[in-house]
Image (cartoon, rainbow, N blue to C red):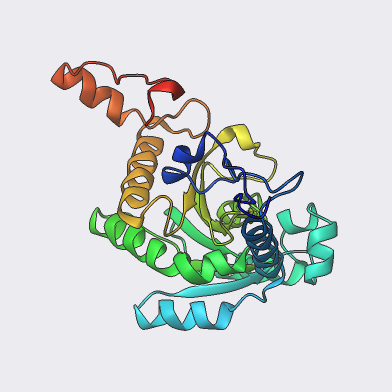
Amino acid sequence: MSDQHPVTENPWQALRRVTNARIALGRAGDSLPTDALLAFQADHARARDAVHLPFAADVLEAQLAAEGLETVRVQSAAADRATYLKRPDLGRRLSAESRQALEALAAQTATDYDAVFVIADGLSALAVHDHGVPMLLSAAHALSGLGWRLAPIVIAEQGRVALGDEIGAILRAEQTALLIGERPGLSVADSLGIYLTYGPQVGRSDAERNCISNIHRQGLRYPTAQQTLIYLMTQARRRKLTGVELKDDRAEADQQAHQLPPPVAYSIAQID
């Protein structure tokens, strides 16, 4: 027994070259190999830390101000992190003070905005710290260059996705693009998501918004995410909708334009 390797390899081991998902880990007796078990425990700790990491809203505000962007700070009706995690409904609505502050801001201008960007901590402030500002800057500058009227950037603490609906409605924005930390997984703890809603108002359903997810270093890159967001926002403006009826069909249109053959489907057996 001492001459034998203690780990039994998994025949799907080759698939791990193309995914960081926990597959083909092998086994040691009836359990996981020690290195796989320790990696799982470390990633679980990172995910828990990401959920409870305090939101550095002051830092984000300073970074955006350095780029010449006006910001507004708001808080959801969840007064603290413990309440936020136990009461998702409170994270979807503004606190009374924040609602009054936004209403006062909206009353100061007669301008209706084409869009408002919201940065919310969500379930991973780490994701927003790592990716929120560069992702927002690339998209905001691109839209400003196209002549869009953008509202001040709203930085929201203890926020859920639907919080953007109330913010956009108060500021009279045609669209809300909310950048938020996604629920950490056991392979990625800093994944950013962008949720786009046309005609934001309280009560919008998830079926009425588009989502661009998995924005992180090993996932969707900033340029690709920005291009997708700009395309969807432009199409939403033209068609006056978002959600299940709005698709990113650029690849299909390009394939038809160039008369490209359909992509080849490979079976698992064909993957070396």
Query: Is residue 152 in view from this perspective?
Result: no
Pick the residue in front: 23 or 185.
23
Across and down, in percent, residue 41 comes to 70, 62
In the rendered image, is residue 118 in sight?
yes
Q: Horizontal and vertical percent for residue 229?
A: 38, 46
The mark total stands at: 0
Position above or below: 88 against 250: below
Going 62% across and 63% down the picture, which residue do you hit? 124
- Residue at 64 percent across and 54 percent down: it is 186
The answer to which quarter of the image holds residue 43 is bottom right
Q: Position of residue 107 (x, y in %)?
A: 56, 66
In this picture, is 226 found above or below 121? above
Which residue is more in the foreground, 254 or 42?
42
Towards the viewer: 152 or 155 = 155
Q: How far across and how far down the image is residue 56, in percent?
A: 59, 79
**Which residue ends up furthest to the left in the rendered image?**
258
**Vertical arrangement, residue 29 with respect to residue 38, above or below:** above
Q: Residue 205: which quarter of the image?
A: top right
Q: Nearer the viewer, residue 263 or 88?
A: 263
Which quadrant would the C terminus be assigned to in this image?
top left
Residue at x-position 55% and y-position 45%: 21
**Residue 149 falls in image quadrant:** bottom left
- Position of 214 relative to 254 (above/below): below
